[in-house]
Amino acid sequence: MRPTLLMILLAAATIGSAKADTRPDRLSPAQPGPETAIRRLMTDQTAAWNRGNIDDFMKGYWNNDSLVFIGKSGPTYGYAAALARYKASYDSPDKMGQLTFSEIKITRLSPEYCFVIGKWALKRRAGDVGGTYTLLFRKIKGQWFIVVDHTS
């Protein structure tokens, strides 16, 4: 009878701890959970890209010298350098094309960090391209930003 009582107590404790999640991002509708916020940010980035607006696309990145972008030509450090790289590489609508993200998997590492894996694709006149990416998101002053982007 003792093992049964122990199992009931463990189950009740597990259910109770799951219901006792009092993190602000789980309680306030103004503050969505990290997965919702990150997906929204990526949707906004896609829309900005597809309008041809790299400046708005970059709003998802941490505007800081510590931002890291790793692409086929190696790492780029800092927001200004990443923005300049995007503008040089995608300097026309034909090169920008239409962006889609797919197979997005978000893993929460801590209250302030999430890791994202997914695929990207550009349908464009200059030739379709695509690949995979890993993103490290950090919650800064209540907002999620990409702090590391490794795209291949």
Image (cartoon, rainbow, N blue to C red):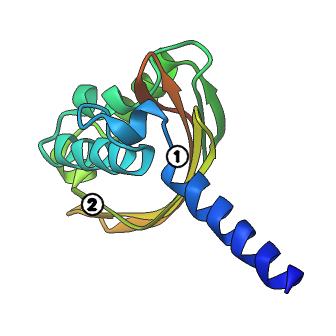
Between 66 and 38, the one lying in front of the other is 38
Determine whether the residue tagged by mark 2 lies in a helix, strand or loop.
Answer: loop
Few, some or many residues within 10 Å of mark 2 (<14, 14–19, 20+): few
Disc 2 from disc 1: Cα separation: 52 Å
Direction from residue 139 to residue 96 in the image, left or right: left
Of pointers 2 and 1, the one earlier in the residue sequence: 1
Task: Name the quadrant of the N terminus.
Answer: bottom right
Residue 46: image location, x then y, percent: 25, 49
User: Which residue bears the numbered disc 2?
Assistant: 126
- Label 1 SS: loop
In the image, taking residue 40 as reference, residue 151 lies left or right, namely right
Residue 91 position by quadrant: top left
Inspect the image, locate mark 2, and give the three-letter code of the amino acid beneath it.
Ala
Location of residue 84 (image quadrant): top left
Q: Position of residue 4 (x, y in %)?
A: 79, 84
How far across and down, in percent of the image, does residue 51 sit? 11, 43
Disc 1 residue type (three-letter): Ala
Residue lying furthest right: 2
- In terms of depth relative to the viewer, which is nearer, 138 or 152? 138
Quarter occupied by the C terminus? bottom right
